[in-house]
Amino acid sequence: MPTIRQDAELQTVITTFETSPGACLDLLELLTDAYDAFIRSQPGFISAGLHVNDAHTRIANYSQWRSRQDYQAMLRTDEMRARNREIVKLCRSFEPVMYEVARVYS
């Protein structure tokens, strides 16, 4: 489960994928399989969530990692590089951005 706290010592990565309604569910399947079969077992992985907009033109991925280095190490693996080559075929664009929690409201 995601931890959203200002004092959390972790790296948050929010990635937005721009896609088409016809490719959205296929992209969601690829991302789900990547988490189920690979990403969730990588060192430093804490949690993630996949969000689909109502028009099926964007997927947002919220993931948390122990450190920036853990996230980058996962991206550099041969398996993730191969998976990303397939993922990019279903996207107009995708952009991972690293964040720190600045404020939390409930």
Image (spheres, rainbow, N blue to C red):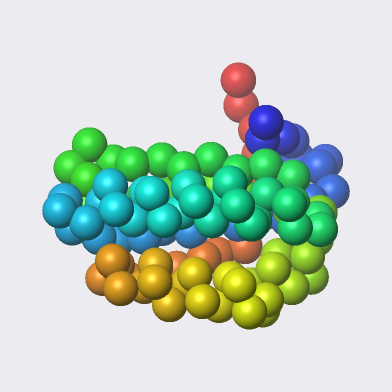
Q: Is residue 29 above or below residue 20?
A: above
Location of residue 87 (image quadrant): bottom left
Location of residue 5 (image quadrant): top right
| Left or right: 6 in relation to 102 | right
Taking depth in this image into account, of 47 and 77 the one nearest to the observer is 77
Q: Is residue 76 above or below residue 54?
A: below
Q: Is residue 57 above or below residue 8?
A: below
* Residue at x 60% of width, y 20% of height: 106
Q: Is residue 72 visible?
A: no
Q: Position of residue 15 (x, y in %)?
A: 48, 58
| Left or right: 12 in relation to 9 | left
In the picture, the quarter occupied by the N terminus is top right
Q: How many marks?
A: 0
Q: Position of residue 62 (x, y in %)?
A: 55, 47
* Residue at x 18% of width, y 42% of height: 55
| Left or right: 28 in relation to 33 | left
Taking depth in this image into account, of 52 and 78 the one nearest to the observer is 78
Q: Position of residue 88 (x, y in %)?
A: 36, 73
Q: Position of residue 89 (x, y in %)?
A: 30, 73
Q: Is residue 15 visible?
A: yes
| Left or right: 38 in relation to 31 | right
* Residue at x 49% of width, y 70% of height: 83
Q: Is residue 10 above or below residue 96?
A: above
* Residue at x 41% of width, y 40% of height: 51
Q: Residue furthest top?
A: 106
